[in-house]
Image: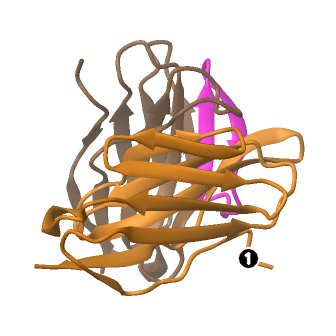
Amino acid sequence: KAGVTQTPRYLIKTRGQQVTLSCSPISGHRSVSWYQQTPGQGLQFLFEYFSETQRNKGNFPGRFSGRQFSNSRSEMNVSTLELGDSALYLCASSLEAVGSYNEQFFGPGTRLTVL
Amino acid sequence: QKEVEQNSGPLSVPEGAIASLNCTYSDRVSQSFFWYRQYSGKSPELIMSIYSNGDKEDGRFTAQLNKASQYVSLLIRDSQPSDSATYLCAVNNKRGGADGLTFGKGTHLIIQP
């Protein structure tokens, strides 16, 4: 079974631009979560989507948004990019909605650099 | 108050020895706990999940959970140089009624040949 895929793998943008990242979960998985990883803050939860609905949201500004499609694929968008948005963006999928006993599996990530 | 705490390391262990990684968490209602391994430049890889007090073994890995003391640990037996990585502890807890995973910042493990 194929794992979680993310595209693109690398992105370079300039301040003020916007970016869209894509994630395809493991076949049969219905939940997709997004995380931001930086050396200083570690892994921080952005949001989770399940059945095309945002189920949870982390403490990030409204510039960060996402959506999920009927085939469970998900996109996240960051508008008005800032230098501090440079990070590794990770997508994780799980069989059902993130809950007490659901394991999450990560994709390879998208490395975003904002200049 | 940090929700999930790990010693950042580096933790240096000789090859063949037992590596012991620890994690404490603050939310008493946490119900599930996960260990991920992350190699430099790669994404986290799930190693173990544990939900009940006690030990859970999988090959060379043993996860230990003590909910009363709010800590979870990972033991790696017969450590190999390929085990050198950052190990992330993740805890599932409820925030505002919704579930979510909170990660520690990870322990950098070095296995010395």
Q: Is residue A77 left or right of residue B109?
A: right
Residue A53 located within the stretch drawn in magenta: yes
What residue appears at the point 59 percent right and 41 percent down from the top-left corner?
Answer: B50
**Of A69 and A49, the residue lying toward us:** A49
- For the N terminus of chain B, the quadrant is bottom right
Tell me what residue is drawn at x 67 percent, y 58 percent: A62
Q: Secondary structure at mark 1?
A: loop
- For the residue pair A10 and B60, the one nearer the viewer reads as B60
Residue bearing mark 1: B2
Q: Residue at x 48, y 70 (%)?
A: B21
* Residue A87 in the image, given as x and y percentages of width and height: 38, 69
A29 in magenta: no
Assign the C terminus of chain B to one quadrant of the image: bottom left
Q: Quadrant of residue A28?
A: top left
Give coordinates of residue A103: x percent, y percent: 52, 34
Question: Is residue A79 in view from this perspective?
Answer: no
Q: Position of residue B24 (x, y in %)?
A: 69, 69
Q: Which chain is brown?
A: A
Apparent side of residue B33 relative to residue B57 in the rendered image (left or right): right
The total of numbered circles placed on residues is 1
**Between residues A39 and A63, which one lies in front from this camera angle?**
A39
Answer above or below: position of B107 versus A65: below
Q: Amino acid at mark 1?
A: Lys
The answer for which chain carries disc 1 is B
Q: Can see residue A26? A: yes
> In the displayed image of the protein, which residue is found farthest to the left?
B113
Span colored in magenta: A45-63
Q: Residue B46: x and y, percent? A: 40, 45
Chain B pictured colour: orange
